[in-house]
Image (cartoon, rainbow, N blue to C red):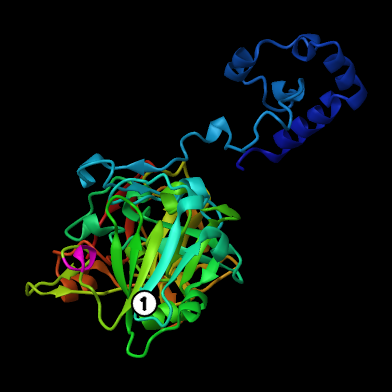
Amino acid sequence: MNEDRSEVARRVAAMERLRPSRRGFMKVAAAGGAVAAFGGPDIKRALAAGENLPPNVPEWMKTLGPGVTASPYGAPSKYEKEVVRRNVGWLTASEESSINFTPIHMLEGIITPSGLCFERHHGGVPEIDPAQHRLVIHGMVARPLIFTMDDIVRFPSVSRIMFLECPANGGMEWRGAQMAGCQFTHGMVHCCEWTGVKLSTLLAEAGVAKGAKWLLAEGADAAAMTRSIPLDKALDDVIVAYAQNGERIRPEQGYPLRLMVPGWEGNVNVKWVRRIKLGDKPWHHREETSKYTDLMPDGTARQFTFVQEANSVVTFPCPERPLDGKGTYEIRGIAWSGRGKIKRVDVSLDGGDNWRSAQLQEPVLSKALVRFRLPWKWEGGPALVQSRALDETGYVQPTIEQLRKVRGVNSIYHKNAIHTWRVNPNGKIDNVQIA
């Protein structure tokens, strides 16, 4: 980007002179010795010496690569081996009841690859035979029903792009900054295209009884995870999903069947769903009493705080992706809101004293991630980089002090405060909190 233009022109001209013809290439390939015929050294030595850089012809242009049968199911390049989910050992007691984090700082666009979506399990990942999986709908219904997977996929299908976020995303930082990197401060979120059947369609088959106001969803994992969900939401936009990003759901994401509850905390999006019971009141099970409640300063706890409020984070620069010297950069990040569409994202470079509106990347969808971008010329001085999201309802992402005044510091859920990265003169980035 900062290379002298005359040097770039020289290299391009040299590349044109050295470009191998198709006829010459095929002769070499047919002889079975493409690299040797070009007189080049082995690939490792060429890489070390920079001999694959312009104007030289790189080694990978001198030999045929693997064919289409070499990889029946695609995988990322080996050079992207660092783009993986990661966990934090001290957060949970065992792998079966644990969490890992989406590498949001390394992703582009709004669709999270299925294999990089964060995981949260309460009893490990069950290995379910879809031919033996059933979905039971019972309770306050006219006709209790049992659906096979074949039954479910015969119903009219819907697809929707939506984010899913654990309500504990960022929750380790209520009292101060402590997580080492963007992946760990905000990586309990992903955004995928989900395909399935509207829950309202299945409930219509069963016939909702008069007086029913809630449903209980139960998963087929070892924890038999359950959550109560208001019937109004279930009849609105909840999907019983069987596909994710164009293929059947990954096992760790709920194969063969899960609930997708747009905009609501991840825990109610019950994976491996096997049973839905309708009733006239919530069930108050473990995951909605001792867990997934918000402890307030006076000792009481907020319950059923379903909606994930507007949130955002700068994904570049961040601790894992420092700045490489002075120059022009593009500040990049993601924003989302369980209330609807993101309307605007502002970026500050001085800790919130001044704000500039960033460009939102299309498409801007309701209850989905949206990318924002802002050009920035860094002169090498310190900076405090923040982002602030505003959604279509008028809700503005709060500061950490605004949240603490209302919520205290004892909760671990629904921390959606404005986040701060400190840029140091050497280009390294620190996770900090400022008042």
Residue 32 sits above or below residue 135 on the image: above
Residue found at x 40% / y 50%: 118
Front residue of 139/225: it is 139
Name the residue that disc number 1 marks: 396
Q: Nearer the viewer, residue 156 or 181?
A: 156
| Residue sitting at x 58%, y 37% | 75
Q: Who is closer to the viewer here, 213 or 136? A: 136
Determine whether the residue tagged by mark 1 lies in a helix, strand or loop: loop
Most distant residue in the bottom direction: 210
Please say if 22 is above or below 435.
above
Q: For this view, does 24 lie left or right of residue 58?
A: right
Q: Is residue 317 visible?
A: no
| Residue 433 showing in the rendered view | yes
Quadrant occupied by the C terminus: bottom left
Horizontal and vertical percent for residue 110?
A: 54, 59
Q: Is residue 358 left or right of residue 218?
A: right
Q: Amino acid at mark 1?
A: Val
Furthest-right residue in view? 23
Magenta stretch bounds = 285-289
Magenta-colored segment: predominant secondary structure:
helix
From the top left corner, tell me how far across and down residue 304 is, in percent.
26, 74
Specify the quadrant of the image occupied by residue 13: top right
Query: Does residue 181 appear to the left or right of 37 in the view shown?
Result: left
Task: Based on the picture, tell me whether residue 287 belongs to the magenta stretch.
Answer: yes
Q: Position of residue 335 (x, y in %)?
A: 44, 65
Quadrant of image for the N terminus: top right
In percent of the image, x 37 and y 46: which residue is there?
125
Quadrant assignment, res 290: bottom left
Q: Position of residue 330 (x, y in %)?
A: 52, 55
Q: Residues within 10 Å of mark 1 (few under 14, many from 20)?
A: some
Q: Is 180 part of what is drawn in magenta?
A: no
Residue nearer the viewer, 208 or 12: 208
